Amino acid sequence: MSEFVLETQGLGITFGGLKALQNLNLQLNKNDLYGLIGPNGAGKTTVFNLLTGVYKPTSGKVFLNGKEITGLSQESINRHGIARTFQNIRLFNNMSVIRNVLVGLHNRSQFHCSALSSMLHTPHYYENERLMRERAKELLRIFDLEDLRNELACSLPYGQQRKLEIARALATNPCLLLLDEPAAGMNPQETAELMNTIRFVRDEFDLTVLLIEHDMSLVSGICDRVTVLNFGTELTHGQTSKVLSDPEVVRAYLGDD
Amino acid sequence: MANYFKNVRKSFKPKHYLNYAIVLTALILFVVLQMTGALPRSRARLLTQIGYSVILAVSLNLVVGFLGELSLGHAGFMCVGAYIGCFCGNALSGVISSKLVVLIISMIIGGVCAALFGFLIGLPALRLKGDYLAIVTLAFGEIVRNLFKNLPWFGESMGMTTKDYGTKLFIVAFVVILLMLFLLQNLIRSKHGRAITAIRDNEIAARAMGINVTYYKLLVFVLAAFFAGIAGVLYGNYVTPVTYSFFSYNYSIEILVMVVLGGMGNITGSILSATLLTYVNFQLTSNLTGEQAALKYLIYALILMVVVIYNNAPALAPIKERFSIHTLRKKLRERRRKSNPEKYAGIINDDRAEWSVVPTKITMDEILSTDIAKVENATEDPTDRSVGK
């Protein structure tokens, strides 16, 4: 019905009497780098949780490539092609780096191997396992983590944990990648590096990226368009440079004087 | 086919075969002892007891250690297996003459029935988390044993008489352990096992990776129940009559203690601790008679406390480290290195030495700014860290 990769129509959710998000309309074209910004508590992460099925929206609809995915479970939304990272990193801490990525590859149809086949260690299992490892290594190589693949995920420094989270999300073969504050806790140099990585990933994997960010240098650096949220409603949206100089937006962040 | 052997060879790790080696060695040793007549009857019975305890501990470890859900109803599944399996065994023994075949069929029936119960109870219960699931499974265990107590076909409170397989039963139990280890360890080392441990580590992230959490929780629950049912059939043929009072929550807790002592998610640990605890229990029960019998619980509890403190107290960490297997391996490595310095030149002697290969800021910049294709073409070393070991 539409050419948009992601489209939301009047998306909203209420928790009891609290209107956490109201009437959000997003339209992401293919290969967009789209930003979602707003002051703390504006409902940005709520949007991600709605898109990925953690919460069920109380109003509105979500379309992915023209197909309605409103109210599906997290698992099936991921299989439809939305992958995400988390604001507070959620790696599988007690697993090695490569295992984290291998978990991401779990649902890829080309790596299908039934539980029975795994339990009996059939030749198919061995072949499948080898292919999965190769693919995981390729992904880690892109993020420069290949040498660290046997380390525990929790022992990595912060910046590399963020990268690993992106690598793991990419392993699920998404068409839309949601990044929740990817630059949080990074120094300016790491942020610059991250900007390159995000751009590279978008081109390499033919992705559409929606990201939440507080770091305005990153937002203005890579996002083509942004939507600004404030108190659960959309304040404005449009070209990044125009939006960021909008006095309304400045007021939302800094308050009236 | 050539590929198959190559893949098998490449993924071969000695530690994957440790558990098979332990069980197989024990099995061969005791079978030889029995054939030469050196194994007393009481010891053979103890071995059977150890056999079904190990099955229970390892299968519960799958739920508690690998999936990370607390289940206190393992004795309930065992109860289902014991009653239904042995009931079928009694019925079949008139039809089939071979005792072993009857036992195998009754184990399969008992296991499948327990798995069915696991599925039925798991379907609603696995929506619950943590303590709530524990309480539901606890209640399940109690309900099941009282159900069998009140059903007329199973001897009611007098218990159900079963066939006694005598001193050879432990061989069957050990073979079952080997089969179980094969299936469960293989599962854990596959993508499905990764999904299961991912659910334990971070359920939200696992869901976001598209893992069907309900499916895996049910799968683990059903598998654990299946093996608990088989253990129940073994128990039923070891003790006659089978009475409902044995499958109380106390026994569920005892299995849980074996799992906790052996270490969550550690199969070797479960095997060893189940063996040790069963042995201690057996010795205490047979040696302390009359008035001393009360001492059993005191000594048993003391042993548990010592083991738990030894495993967890920070003050004992240095002592533990001195005797740990890692220290031993490190020492061996050092010795090897000293005897052959040229071969190991340049390899840093530390477990955590991988930190030295973390790319520094500058090299990272270089890599990112230059050419990713170049990094992709870098030579691949499949043996990677094993060089250092």
Image: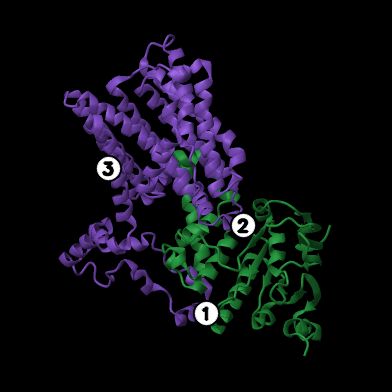
Chain colours: A green, B purple
The image quarter containing residue B183 is top left
Q: Residue at x 47, y 37 (%)?
A: B224
Q: What secondary structure is marked by label 2? A: helix
Q: Chain of mark 2?
A: B
Q: Amino acid at mark 1?
A: Thr
From the viewer's side, name the closer residue of B46 and B336.
B46
- Residue B283, image x, y percentages: 24, 34
Q: Residue at x 46, y 13 (%)?
A: B91
Q: Which mark is residue B370?
A: 1
Q: Residue at x 29, y 51 (%)?
A: B306
Between label 3 and label 1, give the one nearer the viewer: 3
User: Is the Cβ of the residue at disc 3 closer than 8 Å to that at disc 2?
Assistant: no
For residue B357, side relative to residue A53 (left or right): left
Q: Is residue A109 above or below residue A100?
A: above
Labels 1 and 2 within one chain: yes
Q: Is residue B259 above or below residue A70?
A: above
Q: Which mark is residue B208?
A: 2
Can residue A3 be seen in the rendering of this structure? no
Q: Is residue B288 above or below residue B214?
A: above
Which sits earlier in the primary sequence, circle 1 or circle 2?
2
Quarter of the C terminus of chain A within the rendering: bottom right
- Residue A112, image x, y percentages: 56, 46
Neighbours of disc 2 within 10 Å: few (<14), some (14-19), many (20+): many
